[in-house]
Amino acid sequence: MNWNQLQYVITIAEEKNITKAARKLFISQPSLSLSIQSLEKETGVTLFERTHGEVTLTYAGTLFYEWAISILHSQKQLDLKLNDISQEKRSLIRIGISPHRSLIILPSVLERFYEDFPNCEIHIVEKPTYILKKLLENDEIDFMIDVPQPDTINYQSDILTKERIVLAVPSIFTSQPPFLGLPLSYYAEQDTISLSELTAYPFIMLSSDHILGSMSRKMCESAFFHPNIRLTCENVETALSLVSRQLGITFVPEIFARQGKYIPDVCYYPIRQFHDTRQLCLIYPKNRYQHVQLTHLLSLFRDMVPKLYL
């Protein structure tokens, strides 16, 4: 029995097809079949059975599959620990983050990180929240920056800061009520706007599948406000670019107001009826080994992200 055979069993179980598994493993189908036969002979049990064109696990195979996953996970944890000792092996860190946050949050943190660990490789995975959660569950990213993870048994959610939803308004609108007389160049706490004052203005909304789109719609409903929706899109960056083109008002996370330099010709205002905040967290699996580079990067996020909201 060897490490490869453990991976073979896992891949066949997940693909439910020898040919597909062989293709994914980059070996020939006959070689894969022979390896499984050898493993079954060594263990004395049948691991797979073929029914209706699918390859499925037997009861013994299911036990072996679960054990193989545990063993390979333990091997990965050991490799990470040995890597800390050698300090010569290149490390990989996979960050999950929503696209609208990456532009503002990542550059300064990663610039600081690479001053200490210039040889570390980082993969930035920019996806919506629901996809990031699945990637974290499947061990395809090491941590994510998003709203808190409801599963508090398996995941740690460290609060980085709190943010609320604000209005992004085209600068051309600010010469008209209710914006007339309010500052144009910066976001000020006292310059709040009531949704009921905006019935004459067009809105750009995110789709209801987007968390922000769903939240903004609920805000409108609770204020008994029916926005004049001109455009609907799928991400915050697109919505903001349309605001910059003077096409309508949209709802955005507060970070864009705090870092307004990224989008020209847009002014930001808090919404008078809504002072609630949502938590922005650093989310990672509990009880999983963190190598030196990962520990340091997480520490930088904890230290630097709150300052972006000041």
Image: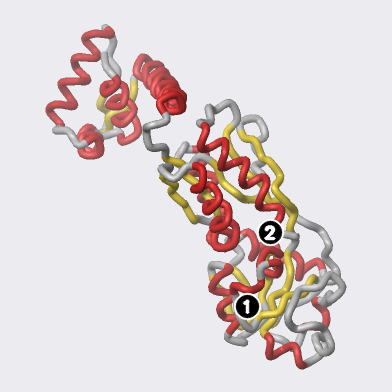
Categorize mark 2 by other alpha carbons within 10 Å: few (<14), some (14-19), many (20+).
few
Task: Give the image location of residue 34, x and y in percent.
Answer: 15, 21
Task: Give the image location of residue 189, x and y in percent.
Answer: 84, 70
Closer to us: 34 or 155: 155
Categorize mark 1 by other alpha carbons within 10 Å: few (<14), some (14-19), many (20+).
many
The circle on residue 308 is 2
Dot 1 lies on which element?
Answer: strand
> From what the image shows, is residue 27 above or below residue 160?
above
Quarter-wise, where is residue 74 in the image? Answer: top left
Name the quadrant of the N terminus. Answer: top left
Quarter-wise, where is residue 10 in the image? Answer: top left
Q: Earlier in the sequence, mark 2 or mark 1?
A: 1
List the single residue furthest toward the bottom. 175
Q: Is residue 190 left or right of residue 10?
A: right
Q: Amino acid under label 1?
A: Ile
The circle on residue 204 is 1
Q: CA distance from mark 2 to mark 1?
A: 26 Å
Task: Give the image location of residue 181, x and y in percent.
Answer: 84, 88
Task: Give the image location of residue 56, x and y in percent.
Answer: 32, 27
- Residue 62 visible in this rendered orientation of the protein: no
Which residue corresponds to the image point at 71% horizontal and 55% vertical from the top-left?
A: 307
Which residue corresponds to the image point at 22% horizontal and 32% vertical from the top-left?
A: 18
Quarter-wise, where is residue 65 in the image? Answer: top left
Which residue corresponds to the image point at 47% horizontal and 42% vertical from the top-left?
A: 117
